[in-house]
Image: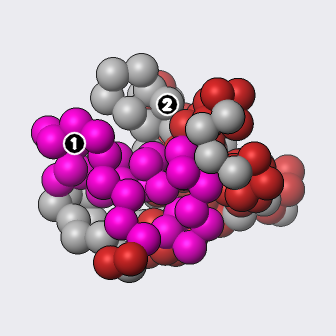
């Protein structure tokens, strides 16, 4: 599924719809909204069901879900402990999707992939 595909909330009681109606059909904005609210259950759902979810970025400013969680910590938007756990989960660069981000960096630059994986995956 693509980040912009239409979605339904993974857990009805944990629905975190994006504020803007135009973004409610994009999976990535549901992830960002859950990250901003510190909902680990929903964040984990999006990351586990979409291999590239940690690499999703907002259309306007290029923010990732981790960026949204960090911003929420700074603003005191939700429970700081929950937000910190979400941030740590989203920034775990030793995960398999870190390899995807690493490879996508080369693809978007239009260069060929390196002959080996990042040092932590070799």
Looking at the image, which is closer to me, 26 or 79?
Answer: 79
102 vs 87, left or right, is left
- Dominant secondary structure (helix, strand or loop) of the stretch shown in magenta: helix
In which quadrant of the rendered image does the N terminus lie?
bottom left
- Return the disc, 1 or 2, that comes first in the chain's sequence: 1
The residue that mark 1 highlights is 23
Residue 101 at x, y = what percent? Answer: 57, 46
**Residue 21 placement: quadrant:** top left
Residue at point 38%, 58% (across, down):
16
Say what secondary structure mark 2 lies in: loop
Residue at point 75%, 47% (across, down):
80
Looking at the image, which is closer to me, 32 or 102?
Answer: 32
Up the image or down, 13 lies above or below 36; here it is below
Q: Which mark is residue 79?
A: none
Residue 115 at x, y = what percent? Answer: 68, 49
Looking at the image, which is closer to me, 76 or 107?
Answer: 76
35 vs 49, left or right, is right
- What is the CA distance from the residue labelled 1 to the residue labelled 2? 14 Å
Residue 102 at x, y = what percent? Answer: 62, 44
The answer to whether residue 52 is magenta is: no
The residue that mark 2 highlights is 63
Residue 64 visible = yes
48 vs 98, left or right, is left
Looking at the image, which is closer to me, 79 or 33?
Answer: 79
Residue at point 62%, 46% (across, down):
78
The answer to whether residue 20 is magenta is: yes
Up the image or down, 106 lies above or below 101; here it is above
Highlighted range, magenta: 14-43
């Amino acid at each position: 599924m693509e980040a912009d595909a239409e979605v339904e909330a993974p857990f009805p009681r944990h629905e975190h719809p994006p504020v803007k109606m135009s973004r409610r059909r994009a999976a990535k904005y549901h992830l960002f909204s859950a990250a901003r609210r510190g909902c680990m259950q929903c964040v984990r759902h999006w990351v586990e069901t979409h291999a590239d979810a940690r690499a999703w970025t907002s259309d306007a400013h290029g923010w990732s879900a981790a960026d949204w969680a960090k911003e929420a910590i700074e603003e005191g938007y939700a429970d700081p402990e929950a937000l910190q756990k979400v941030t740590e989960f989203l920034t775990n660069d030793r995960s398999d999707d870190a390899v995807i981000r690493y490879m996508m960096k080369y693809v978007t630059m239009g260069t060929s992939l390196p002959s080996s994986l990042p040092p932590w995956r070799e």
